[in-house]
Image (tube, rainbow, N blue to C red):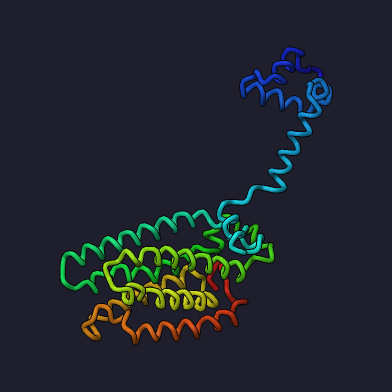
Amino acid sequence: MTWHLPADLVERYARGRLDPAQVMSVESHLAGCPRCRAAVPYEEGWLAASWERIEDLVDMPRPRAAARVLRRLGVPEHVATFLAATPALARGWLVAVTGVLAFAVAAAHLGAHGGPDKANALLPFLVAAPILPVAGIAMAYGRHVDPAYELQAATPMAGWRALLLRTLAVLCCAVGLTGAATPLLPAPPGLAVAWLLPSLALTAAALALSTRFAPPFSVAVLAAAWFGAVAAGPLLADDRLLAFSPGAQALYGAAALALVPLVYLRRGRLDPGDPR
């Protein structure tokens, strides 16, 4: 180096009196000039304390609020940290779930006031509620929905473990939000909770299909089948709520009980990446 920082410039830099452009220029020079670096005054105590704060922030970051809540509920630390690092779309999904439930509850109240058939007024809510956790599975984990997918793919939590853990988290959130909305419905409790068994059956079916296909494709197929089944009620028995009748509920329960062991046995084939 044939040029070095003037003493007054070094002093102003040390006191923080330079504008950003000058700071960048000075630091660029300091990176390649040991003599000028040695001329910059500093306090050893301040430097040590600053480094300790930076080291703590990098090595021991503050857990997210969701991770702290999960740990208080008894979830292991590594699982809580993984679940808290959800994809960016998770917030959008939660907002969408809340919006859909609010709309469905409002539609049920409007339908109940507009006519004598309160049971049919619940149809928008009963149709939408089982699809919400299934839709969350499509964006729970995978190459195209998780910004940290490549990093997580190299960890022991990758693959079916990650998909099942996030599916459980999605199911708990969806069931919790839907359950909180259920008492707001203008209907008896028995009919108001008719969404629960279909929701569990569709979730189990989505995971079972995901052992063969990518989750987004599996979810799309099941959503179309669900809407078709509900629409078939008036055609088969002149009953708009046929898909929520006691007989249908028994089928949903049996399907969920049969599919959960199947998913567990075939868990190694769960592929959250590209379609097979």
Which residue is depicted at the point 81% across and 28% down?
44
Residue 111 falls left or right of residue 255: left
Picture coordinates of residue 96, whole percent (x, y):
39, 58
The residue lying toward the viewer, choosing from 239 and 73, is 73
Instruction: Report the number of discs.
Output: 0
Picture coordinates of residue 103, whole percent (x, y):
30, 60
In which quarter of the view is residue 266 placed? Answer: bottom right
Image quarter in which the N terminus is found: top right
Which residue is depicted at the point 35% across and 62% down?
101
Would residue 41 be visible to someone looking at this image?
Answer: yes
Picture coordinates of residue 37, whole percent (x, y):
80, 24
Which residue is depicted at the point 36% across and 63% down?
181
The residue lying toward the viewer, choosing from 247 and 183, is 183
Residue 226 falls left or right of residue 233: right
In which quarter of the view is residue 78 placed? Answer: bottom right
Would residue 85 be visible to someone looking at this image?
Answer: no
